[in-house]
Image (spheres, rainbow, N blue to C red):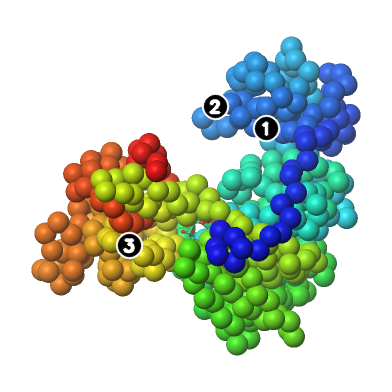
């Protein structure tokens, strides 16, 4: 929380309501064309037996690796009220032909019965979850707790219908994240979500391996407009080189446009941003004749940009911008996406910035810039490989040398084979400051990186950015040092 947020007093955000009845057995049977074994009410929907809580409907999906029907007993041990199954089981259930199709049908029923609710869909190359969470926090405040959202990054062909099926009937707002690896995926998801507001956070080279070009990535994200409800609004990044492409795709389906960014033509336009001494920013923005001033707790220029996107989306959803300002002022860093932790080290403490959940060229640059602005005795970057870049991987990794230098990084720990390109770039005949002996190490795994960092020795005042694609496993490194949380 920044200085302004700390000195102002405002009401606490509403608590989420107690778990209420979500679906009756009859409603599930009607939605899915299935047969209920008896009468019951469920208060949640879950697909992983380990995550089942009391009152849930456990949906037994048949995956490539495992069949959910094998875990039904476990789901009931964990408190499931009923199961959605494709063969009879000795527990309360609804029997259907295909449980995945039934989950989609339940999602469609949830969306249909939520008719007066305003629905926001969020996609983009980076920042989806953070922006989704911030929009949700704003709408939750505005609607006194009657907003719903997809949890975590539940943004694929399973996560989206699951999140829809979980939406309470009396929700006034719903916020859903949509992700993709391939063209055509967002089209399928947006048809289920049918948003009133379709948000694209950023266009950046994530998943370029499958899509081939930046224009193709932009086109794949623009598929979200295909599901817009009539009269809906497209919230798009005004500063993106792909702005015109996104705008034209939105106009082609009759959408209204609300753009955000620093560009002159942006509707939600950045006027000024001041970095707060405690982290975070104070932002001034303009929307038509209105001047908006608000605090953003998340540090970094990328969160100034994200905040404009959040403000635009909340406005397009017809909710209160004051509520959005309060939500942005009090949002803490999410685990793996910017959470900060103090770790005890000889002589005091070091600050870890936990960005271990994902990485691509855009988010690497954004967070390295943020590291450069964070006061520190020494700046250390633990960088894991960026996945799914295909043939572009070597050049995107090597290109991190400049942002590392610009951020004044004193020591780098590079993790994963893809980082060989950056190691080679840094090591080129002393051209780079980090190329000096001890400037950087290249490790094969998170375990080796822990050992390298311990051998190098952290001291008081160090700031350590930990960032890489999730599969590199740098979350383990953060957890290791978090054992000595100060
Ligand atoms: N606007 C932005 N520009 C560049 N980087 C950003 C931006 N917003 C967030 N990031 C960075 O991207 C990281 C991931 O953010 P987030 O989890 O919100 O993205 P996502 O799009 O939901 O990712 P995923 O595709 O894995 O679901 C953050 O930790 C931060 O480093
Ligand atoms: Mg996400």
User: Residue 106, image x and y in percent?
Assistant: 78, 39
Residue 46's label in the rendered image is 1
Q: Residue at x 58, y 26 (%)?
A: 50
Residue 462 falls in image quadrant: bottom left
Q: Nearer the viewer, residue 450 or 391?
A: 450
Write the residue at 76% across / 73% down. Answer: 255
Residue 198 lies left or right of residue 116; in this view the side is: left
Q: Quadrant of the C terminus?
A: top left
Where 44 falls versus 144 (above or below)? above
Q: Residue at x 47, y 58 (%)?
A: 207
Mark drawn on residue 376: 3
Q: Secondary structure at mark 1?
A: strand
Q: Position of residue 266 (x, y in %)?
A: 63, 82
Observer-side mark, 3 or 2, equals 3
- Horizontally, is 231 left or right of 240 in the view? right
Can residue 361 be seen in the rendering of this structure?
no
């Amino acid at each position: 929380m920044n200085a302004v947020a700390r000195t102002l007093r405002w009401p606490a955000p509403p608590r989420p309501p107690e778990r209420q009845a979500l679906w009756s057995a009859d409603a599930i049977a009607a939605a899915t064309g299935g047969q209920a074994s008896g009468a019951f009410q469920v208060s949640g929907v879950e697909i992983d037996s380990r995550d089942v809580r009391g009152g849930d409907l456990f949906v037994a999906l048949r995956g490539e690796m495992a069949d959910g029907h094998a875990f039904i007993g476990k789901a009931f041990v964990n408190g499931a009220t009923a199961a959605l199954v494709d063969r009879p089981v000795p527990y309360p259930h609804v029997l259907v032909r295909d449980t995945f199709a039934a989950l989609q049908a339940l999602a469609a029923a949830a969306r249909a019965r939520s008719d007066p609710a305003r629905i926001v869909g969020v996609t983009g190359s980076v920042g989806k979850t953070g922006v989704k969470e911030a929009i949700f926090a704003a709408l939750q405040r505005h609607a006194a707790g009657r907003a719903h959202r997809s949890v975590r990054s539940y943004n694929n062909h399973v996560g989206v219908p699951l999140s829809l099926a979980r939406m309470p009937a009396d929700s006034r707002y719903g916020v859903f994240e949509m992700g993709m690896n391939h063209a055509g995926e967002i089209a399928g998801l947006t048809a289920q979500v049918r948003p009133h507001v379709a948000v694209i956070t950023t266009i950046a080279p994530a998943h370029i391996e499958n899509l081939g070009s930046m224009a193709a990535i932009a086109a794949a994200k623009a598929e979200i407009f295909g599901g817009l409800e009539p009269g809906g609004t497209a919230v798009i990044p005004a500063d993106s080189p792909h702005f015109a492409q996104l705008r034209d795709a939105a106009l082609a389906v009759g959408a209204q446009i609300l753009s955000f960014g620093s560009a002159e033509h942006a509707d939600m336009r950045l006027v000024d941003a001041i970095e707060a001494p405690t982290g975070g920013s104070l932002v001034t923005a303009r929307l038509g004749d209105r001047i908006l001033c608000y605090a953003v707790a998340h540090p970094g220029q990328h969160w100034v940009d994200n905040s404009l996107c959040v403000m635009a989306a909340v406005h397009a959803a017809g909710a209160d911008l004051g509520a959005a300002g309060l939500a942005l002022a009090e949002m803490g860093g999410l685990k793996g996406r910017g959470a900060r932790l103090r770790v005890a080290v000889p002589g005091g403490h070091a600050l870890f910035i936990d960005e271990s959940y994902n990485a691509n060229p855009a988010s690497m640059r954004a967070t390295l810039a943020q590291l450069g602005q964070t006061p520190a005795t020494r700046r250390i970057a633990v960088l894991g490989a960026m996945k799914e870049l295909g043939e572009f991987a070597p050049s995107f990794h090597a290109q991190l040398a400049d942002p590392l230098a610009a951020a004044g990084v004193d020591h780098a720990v590079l993790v994963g084979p893809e980082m060989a390109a950056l190691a080679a770039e840094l090591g080129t005949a002393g051209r780079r400051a980090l190329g000096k002996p001890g400037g950087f190490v290249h490790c094969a795994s998170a375990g080796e990186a822990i050992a390298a960092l311990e051998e190098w020795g952290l001291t008081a005042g160090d700031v350590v950015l930990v960032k890489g694609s999730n599969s590199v496993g740098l979350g383990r490194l953060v957890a290791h040092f978090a054992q000595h949380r100060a």
